[in-house]
């Protein structure tokens, strides 16, 4: 039963070096396949492989790669293979049926109806067949006696191909994005996404120890080695110079006597973010302060801003940022009782933007979580609920969580408020992270910024969850904002709510004192420049 992420184990018996992506699934074995390989199945002794052109099914010794047996394929163009109940099951590109093949006799003993017009992959689970219906973009569980559909889940992506079942999860290959997904078979949630070892992954099979994949472009058969490694994956480092500036302009008619400005000091305590050059502040800060969430700020005191005058405070730093992927296995997440008491006490409190006790929030928690006890699935269900009930709209308002949920639209901060309220109300410690973003080009300016949430999962620690990052209908896309940090965010702020220095803002905050009447304009932005 495979419940783990792939390692980067060295390949054994590798025929050639194949570079594809930056985090390829670990290869334990690699063998030469046929010229046009498609489906795979495991019968307990051999890996069976279907070939589109030769129209034969081949039994392959998993230890040597040698062909041990072959059976004439009943399909003119086989696509999917599965082994169950002592028979091989074969789907074909041009057929609307699934063949039941007696391997020993070498003949077809039954044909059942396929669930759709194009069945690309098959898998066997406890007396039932799973079939990848590419025409309907569904994975359908069917009765093998007559092909009656039992239920279906949505395909994880538009281009699902091969299928396997490991005793707990479905595995699905995606030939368009060169990915292999681990999918929870009840609701269709994608739990893991890893790069395939080749550029055109087709058939999949599970032997209980490996996930086997055959690649249509490299004509190779790969045994992918599972591992219990839970360490985050760091990749694609990028160096940049970042200058963050806050401008304060007095519009008059009276001067501003004093303005206290607080700039969040970029975080140096993160494994994927290194501060290569300490921030150079202009002017020199009055002092440095730390709020109740342990966030440090540079504090500036700007005095006597005359009407029409603009004053600025800023810092410049050089950073190296890695993309960071944290792959979460639900069974490896500890119970709520394993959450450290100090973390739970600090990060489950209510706040003025959250209003956890509001019936709107309480009803949302009940509807989303139900009687689920596993913290991962509690988080995942609330994440899915927020995505399904709130549409992203950057309107600049920071409304309370109940109002955002009732309205059905929100900015990234408002998404964070809703998710924080629900997660904290369910007993999951939740905080927010925020920072400045590289916008499309390496040399760019950001005046929008971004905020997202993090949850504490026992066994993994703090895990990124950004409900505002996608509204895709595809589960493969919905997985990306969970645990993944791109290398274009400089994280400046980690907080739990209302700060005594910046309130619910992030990156910076300020307050001004003046006598009489005046108007103060404030602008803030970050400039990015690449560093070779």
Image: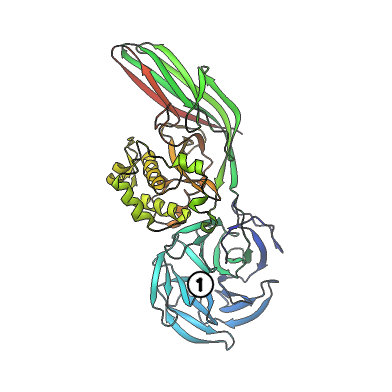
Say which residue appears at 58% left-offset and 78% top-offset. 57
Say which residue appears at 59% left-offset and 87% top-offset. 104
Q: Is residue 138 left or right of residue 104?
A: left
Q: Position of residue 113 (x, y in %)?
A: 41, 79
Camera-nearest residue between 480 and 197: 480
* SS at mark 1 in the image: strand
Q: Badge 1: few (under 14), some or many (20 or more) residues near its Cα, within 10 Å? A: many
Quarter the N terminus occupies? bottom right
Residue 142 versus residue 371 in the image, above or below:
below
User: Residue 137, can we see it?
Assistant: no
- The residue wearing badge 1 is 123
> According to the image, what is the colour scheme of the structure?
rainbow
Q: Is residue 492 left or right of residue 505?
A: right
Q: Position of residue 384 (x, y in %)?
A: 39, 53
Q: Position of residue 523 (x, y in %)?
A: 39, 25
Q: Position of residue 217 (x, y in %)?
A: 58, 63
Residue 44 versus residue 222 in the image, above or below:
below
Camera-nearest residue between 242 and 324: 324
């Amino acid at each position: 039963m495979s419940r783990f992420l792939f390692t980067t184990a060295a390949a054994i018996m590798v025929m050639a070096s194949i570079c594809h992506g930056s985090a390829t699934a670990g290869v334990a074995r690699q063998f030469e396949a046929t010229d046009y390989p498609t489906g795979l199945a495991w019968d307990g002794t051999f890996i069976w492989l279907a070939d589109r052109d030769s129209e034969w099914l081949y039994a392959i010794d998993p230890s040597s790669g040698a062909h041990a047996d072959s059976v004439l394929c009943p399909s003119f163009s086989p696509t999917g293979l599965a082994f169950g109940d002592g028979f091989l099951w074969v789907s074909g590109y041009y057929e609307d049926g699934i063949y039941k093949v007696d391997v020993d006799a070498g003949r077809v003993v039954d044909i059942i109806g396929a669930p759709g017009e194009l069945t690309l992959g098959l898998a066997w689970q406890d007396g039932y067949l799973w079939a990848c219906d590419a025409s309907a973009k569904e994975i359908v569980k069917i009765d093998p006696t007559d092909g009656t559909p039992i239920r279906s889940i949505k395909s994880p992506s538009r281009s699902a191909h091969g299928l396997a079942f490991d005793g707990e999860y479905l595995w699905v290959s995606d030939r368009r994005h060169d990915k292999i997904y681990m999918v929870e078979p009840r609701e269709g949630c994608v739990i893991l996404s890893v790069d395939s070892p080749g550029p055109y992954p087709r058939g999949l099979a599970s032997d209980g120890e490996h996930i086997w994949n055959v690649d249509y472009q490299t004509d190779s058969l790969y045994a992918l080695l599972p591992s219990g490694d839970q360490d985050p994956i760091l990749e694609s480092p990028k160096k940049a110079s970042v200058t963050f500036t806050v401008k304060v302009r007095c519009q008059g008619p009276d001067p501003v006597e004093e303005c206290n400005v607080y700039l969040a000091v970029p975080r140096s305590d993160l494994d994927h973010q290194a501060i290569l050059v300490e921030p150079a502040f202009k002017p020199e800060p009055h002092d440095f302060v730390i709020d109740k969430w342990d966030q440090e700020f540079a504090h500036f005191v700007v005095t006597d801003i005359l009407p029409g005058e603009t004053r600025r405070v800023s810092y410049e730093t050089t950073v190296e940022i890695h993309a960071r992927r944290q792959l979460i296995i639900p069974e490896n997440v500890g119970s709520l009782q394993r959450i450290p008491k100090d973390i739970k006490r600090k990060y489950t409190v209510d706040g003025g933007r959250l209003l956890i006790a509001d019936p709107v929030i309480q009803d949302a928690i009940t509807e989303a979580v139900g009687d689920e006890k596993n913290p991962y699935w509690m988080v995942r269900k609330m994440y899915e609920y927020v995505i399904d009930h709130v549409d992203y709209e950057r309107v600049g308002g920071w409304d309370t969580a109940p109002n955002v949920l009732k309205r059905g639209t929100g900015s990234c901060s408002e998404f964070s408020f809703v998710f924080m309220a629900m997660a904290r109300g369910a007993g999951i410690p939740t905080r927010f992270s925020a920072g400045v973003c590289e916008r499309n080009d390496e040399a760019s300016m950001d005046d929008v910024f971004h905020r997202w949430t993090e949850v504490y999962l026992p066994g993994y620690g703090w895990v990124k969850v950004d409900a505002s990052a996608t509204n895709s209908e595809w589960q493969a896309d919905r997985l990306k904002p969970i645990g993944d940090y791109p290398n274009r965010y400089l994280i400046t702020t980690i907080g739990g709510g209302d700060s005594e220095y910046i309130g619910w803002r992030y990156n910076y905050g300020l307050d001004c004192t003046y006598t009489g009447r005046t108007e103060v304009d404030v602008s803030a932005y970050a400039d990015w420049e690449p560093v070779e």
